[in-house]
Each structure stands twice: as structure tokens, then as C-alpha cells.
Amino acid sequence: MTNAAQAPAGKAGRREWIGLGILALPTLLIALDIGVLFLALPQLSGDLGTSGTEQLWITDIYGFMLAGFLITMGNLGDRIGRRKLLLIGAAAFGAASILAAYANSPEMLIAARALLGIAGATLNPSTLALISNMFRDDKQRGVAISLWATCQFGGAALGPLVGGLMLDHFWWGSVFLLGVPVMVVLLVAGPRLLPEYRTSDSGRRLDLVSVVMSLLAILPTIYGIKELAAGGAQSSEGVAWAALAIGLAFAVAFVRRQGTLKDPLVDLQLFSEPAFAITLGAMALASGAFAGTSFLTSQYIMSVADLTPTAAGLWQAPTGGGIAAGVLLAPLFLRWMTPRTAMVGGLTLSALAYLVLTQVGAEGGLVTVVVCIALVAFGVGPLFALGTGLVIGSAPVEKAGAAASLSESSNVLGSTLGLAVLGTLSAAVYRDEVSGAVPDTLASPAAKAAQETVAGGTASAAELGGDAGQALLSAAREAFTSGLNTVSWVAATVAVAVGVAVAVVLREKTVQQDGPQPTDAGSLEEARA
């Protein structure tokens, strides 16, 4: 039975905070699921006999589907009920996890990972939208979103540790089964602890043409960016550019269509609110700069500092801890400063850390690199935590799911673009500087590998041996470090630009009010079993 009720306007009570703990479970799981796969990849590749191309699809298809369906699922939750969509997605995620764990062929595992991505796209927008409904008090909502974001980033940091423990004692499929008990708890406790919210306008319909157009805009774009960043053969580069052109063409058509619909998939009027539009762009740019730089610092720790995988994982732990601390402590900063000041202060810290990275060398730079990227992570934490709350608060309550999906999409697309652009820039610097150090006596395949990546340079140097090998190794490490220095200059510039935009556009009054508050609480229904 469904009863219409006004969304709670006062402070949240014990039930809402317990419900937040339930909502944190799928958030933590999705982040964990991404990290554990990379550790399991060698084992599952050996068991299933996957090719190099199949390995790429196993790792990438999840992110493709997740990014492609976020906007659709956020809007669907607004229409059919956010709790309902969350529980449907949880059941689908659990089933797909079992399918992935017991996959007996590469094709079966790729299909299971695709289903996991689609199911995952229902979870984060639904949890974030429900948080915005359950916690109507600005301060409480800020704390709740920070805890939610901490689970998201903390899960990514815990992924390698949990995955390593599982793989030490069980087979590779066990890492996928981590999701099953979590989803069972959500399915059992969710209906009892989580309220239901949906728009009461039964006339709202999901525009299927817009859904297809959004997929044709996002998926080819991400594919093209990833392929261009990988730098494959000329034929695959042509396919990548074609995919990118198709994606951008459908993106333009999608935006035009939204302007003509009475009930669009993406309400373009949301972007007329400066707080909403600027914060979305700021999070996308900041996540791109952070993703691209942290990817290079992880390679520095592995290949330049020459650490074992286990040791490298431990040295990378401060990065995950830094961003988790940044998002968790963000609400505490508001006791002494405004949200705008907290975000700008964090971005300033990140910019300073990026500037230090521009001066790091190939010798003796391990501690500097680890400390700096952890400070960068800590600095962007307030932007992600408070910015997410600002985006959700800037949208009407009945469109919280759509706003949450746009917030998630900006982070996913920003990270993808950052990895592609900054990775390509670093690779170009590396190739330019290392090319003159490759000896003519080195065999053609090894010489080509040495000029492509620092890992290839390390392997080729070991094959060459002697003084010549040592010289090539030093040159490869220096060239890679130069690429990291260059990327850090770009990332510092981005951090400064984002900080200025936040400081100028997000006036104190706008940020403190957390956006326009809804005036029609009756547009929501609270359904209780």
C-alpha cells in the first residue's frame, strides 16, 4: 500500500542514520569491485585462456556500462521509486556477481561484467538521491554525503588489500562473490529501514529515444578516448577517432532533443543554476587531473622506484587514505570556514603538491611522490564531498536522482578524459626524451618497447645488460619522470583554474544555502509497506 506523505523537513533521526549505513554497503562494494579485478586478472586469464583483447574487455566493459547507464538509471529512479530501483539493482548485481565468479569462458565473464556495470549504475545514484531525501537538514546532509563518499573512496583503497587476501586463500572467482552477502543484507534490511521516494506525476515517461541517444553519446566517446590514449596501430587509431566523432555527434543531438521535450532525460534548466553547473565542471576537471597524475605516480612507485608489487601497494595506500580523510573531514571544516573556503583551500593544497611534483627527480623521489599525491588526494576531498552535496542541493528534490547521476557521470567522464589526455601527454614526453638513448644494437621489438613505456624500457634494459643496459634504464626512468613533471604542471594549472572558478562563481550566500530548496514537498510520495 502506498501513502502520500511530505518529505521530512526536520533533522534526521536514528532510523535515517541506520539507513545511511545500509546505503553505504553498495557504495563500498562498487569501489571494492573495481580494485580487486586487477589483482585477479592474471589468475583468471590463465584459467580461462583469455587473449590480450579479451583482457581489455573484461576490465573496461564494467566502466563502459556504468558510465553509459548512470543518467538513465538516475532518471528511472525518480520515476519508479529510488528504493525500488536500488533493490532491483542490488538483486541484479548479486546475480551478476555469481555469474562472474563461476564464468567458464572469457565471453561469459565479459557478459557478466557488462551486467555488473548496468546494475552498478542503479546503485550510486539511488543511494545518493535517497540520502538527499532522508537528510533535509543542510549540516546533516553534508555529514551523510561525506560518509557516503568516504565509503566510495575508502573502498577503492581497500580493494587491493581485500583482493590480495582473498586470492591468497581462494580461487579468482571469490573476489566477485564479495558482493553477494552485501546485496543480501541490502535486500533484507532495505525495505525495513529505507523510505521510498518518487515523483507523484504519473504522466512522466522515460523517453527511450533519449536513453538510446545518451548511450550512443557516452559509450563511443569513452571507447575513443581510451583507444587514443592506448596509442595502438594506425588502423585502430582511425576507429578511435571515428568512435569519438560518432559519440560527439550524438551528444549534440541529445542536448538538442532535451531542449524540445516536456519531460527530458536531462533537464537543461538545472545548468542555469551557477552553483550546479560550475560545481559539476569543477569536479570533472579535478577528478581528471587527479586520475591522470595518480596513475603516473603509481607507475613511478612500481617502475622508477623499482619496488615489488606488494611493497608498491603499501606505498600507494596513503593516496587512498588521503582522499578518504579529505571527504570525511570536510563537514568538520565547516565549523571554522564556509564551504567555498574549504573547497578553495583544498584545491590550493592540491596545487601546491602538484607544483612540488614538477620538481621531483628519478633518484630518491619516492617519499616526495607518495607524500605529494596523498596531499593532492586530501586536497580534492572537500570538493568531492561538499561539491556533491551542492549539486544535489541545487536541484529540486523530485530530480535528486537525475542530479546524482550527473554528479557521478561528471566524475567518471572526468577521470576517463584525464587518464587519456594526461597519459598521452606523458607518453609523448617519454618517447621524445628516451628515443636518443636506445642503442642501435638493441633488437627491433625490444627497441620499440623501450620507446613506448617505462615498463618496456626496463624490460629492454634487462635484456641488453651491462653498462648499455644500465644507461638505457636510467634514461627510461629519467624520461618517465620528465613526463610526470610535465603532467604535474598541467594538473597544477587545472587545480588553480578550478579553485578560481569556485571562488568567483560560488558566492558565499549560494554555497551556504546549499542551493534552492524545494517548494513543493507534496510532489514526492513516501511509500511504506
Image (spheres, helix red, strand yellow):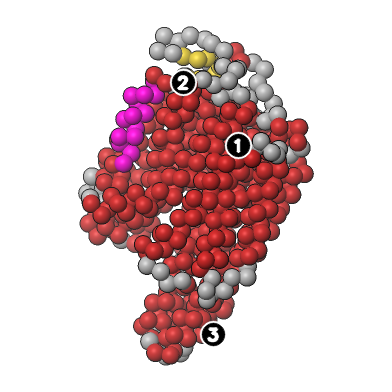
Horizontally, residue 321 falls left or right of residue 462, namely right
**Residue kind at label 1, given as amino acid type:** Pro
Q: Which mark is residue 331?
A: 1
Depth check, front residue: 153 or 322: 322
Stretch in magenta: 178-191
Q: Please tell me whether residue 137 is drawn above or below residue 443 in the rendered image.
A: above
Quadrant hosting residue 312: bottom left
Q: Is residue 482 magenta?
A: no
Horizontally, residue 465 falls left or right of residue 395, namely left
Where does label 3 land, which residue?
A: 436
User: How far apart in space, not on screen, are marks 3 and 2 (Cα)?
Assistant: 65 Å
Image coordinates for residue 293, horizontal then vertical, percent: 55, 60
**Residue kind at label 3, given as amino acid type:** Gly
Depth check, front residue: 65 or 177: 177
User: How far apart in space, not on screen, are marks 2 and 1 (Cα)?
Assistant: 21 Å
Q: Which mark is residue 15?
A: 2
Please tell me how crowded label 3 is: few (under 14), some (14-19), or many (20+) other residues with Cα within 10 Å. few
Which residue does the image show at 22% across and 57% down from the upper left? 47
**Residue kind at label 2, given as amino acid type:** Arg
